[in-house]
Amino acid sequence: MTMKKINYLVIYIFITNSMLADLNIYTHRHYDSDKLLFKKFTNLTGIKINVIKGGADQLIQRLISEGENSPADVLLTVDAGRLERAKSLGLLKPVYSDILIKNIPTNMRDYDNYWFGLTVRARVIVYSKERVNKNELSTYEDLASPKWKGRIVVRSSNNIYNQSLMASIINANGIDIALDWAKSVRGNMARKPRGNDRDQARAVASGIADLAIINTYYLGLLENSTDSKDRNVAKKLGVFFPNQNNRGSHINVSGGAVTASSKNVEQALKFLEFLTDQENQKMFSSVNYEYPLKFKNTNSATLLGWGGFKSDSVHLSILGKNNAEAVKLFDIAGWE
């Protein structure tokens, strides 16, 4: 190649890269895995990422306030319930991608391509290895049994993780049974709901309760913490995946979507495709202990150590649609 051609090539690359618009990401996620992947995406594409962080509900409210003038291109948030809410409020834009269709299981992406699951969390039972025989455990529904009176801790019902679990129970059993379940589990609690999922795990380890309902990745963070106190908490706990003999354990996703206001749809779509790539999915597992969209692709010793499990195959959009009913039933049940 002549020097003249090389100079033209350098100029072309410079102009092309300078024409690439920045990608503005509104994200509720706050993990090291994301920082690493954002950097990798920029290095591969030349597209600079601007990250705006906030609470999940705060970001949705911000998109509402900014309207069509919002600079946001991508929304990253947790739980299909929130993604469905953003869709219903007209904050998302449908996009089609053969890559996303291939990489994401059908039940983990919106029917109409408004949002897409990116990582998976299972909501499981953790139990005291000292005080609970694993053979006593079976289903979420069994947590309503009198044998667990005063032995359960779980976070508040205003948390989206619990709301989606309740939505799945409504889907599986109907409203009446779901309400009875919520009342009974509330009656079996060792204390009023408070704290996050890690706080529930710590309560079991310290003897306040014998069981807790938490998301798997929180336990992974405890197991691999730099704090020896957290690692000691994890050592005292066993992991149980409920409902393995029927519908499977409840799962939910952390997901992404192109915003309705995006002026950079092509780049935003490229970014979502990048996050679902098999190699990049492994980053979520190895750094943040979230399951990849296709469980078998995990390379995390922590996740593999918990063993495989059957997951509930209900379409996650249904859980979003059941959210309002779930909140209503929690209120009736007195689950703070």
Image (cartoon, rainbow, N blue to C red):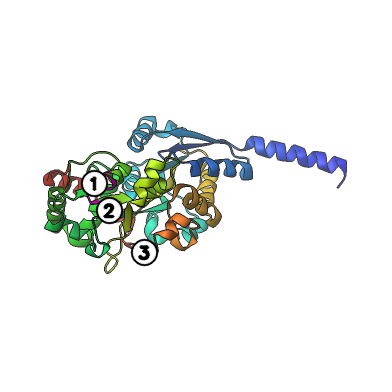
> Disc 2 residue type?
Ser
> Disc 1 residue type?
Gly
Mark yes or no: residue 189 visible.
Answer: yes
Label 1, residues with CA under 10 Å away: few <14, some 14-19, many ≥20 = few
Quarter that holds the C terminus: top left
Q: Are marks 2 and 1 in contact (CB under 8 Å)?
A: yes
Of the image marks 2 and 1, the number of the one nearer the N terminus: 2
Please tell me whether mark 3 or mark 1 is closer to you in this view: 1
Residue matched to label 3: 309
Residue matched to label 2: 128
* In this picture, residue 206 sits left or right of residue 301: left
Residue matched to label 1: 207
Q: Is residue 205 magenta?
A: yes
Mark yes or no: residue 321 visible.
Answer: no
Q: Is residue 214 magenta?
A: no
Label 2, residues with CA under 10 Å away: few <14, some 14-19, many ≥20 = many
The percent coordinates of residue 32 (x first, y second) are 49, 41
* In this picture, residue 281 sits left or right of residue 209: right
Q: CA distance from mark 2 to mark 1?
A: 8 Å
Instruction: Indicate the secondary structure of the residue bearing disc 2.
Output: strand
The percent coordinates of residue 252 (x first, y second) are 35, 53
The percent coordinates of residue 158 (x first, y second) are 24, 41
Q: Which residues are magenta?
A: 203-211
Instruction: Indicate the secondary structure of the residue bearing disc 1.
Output: loop
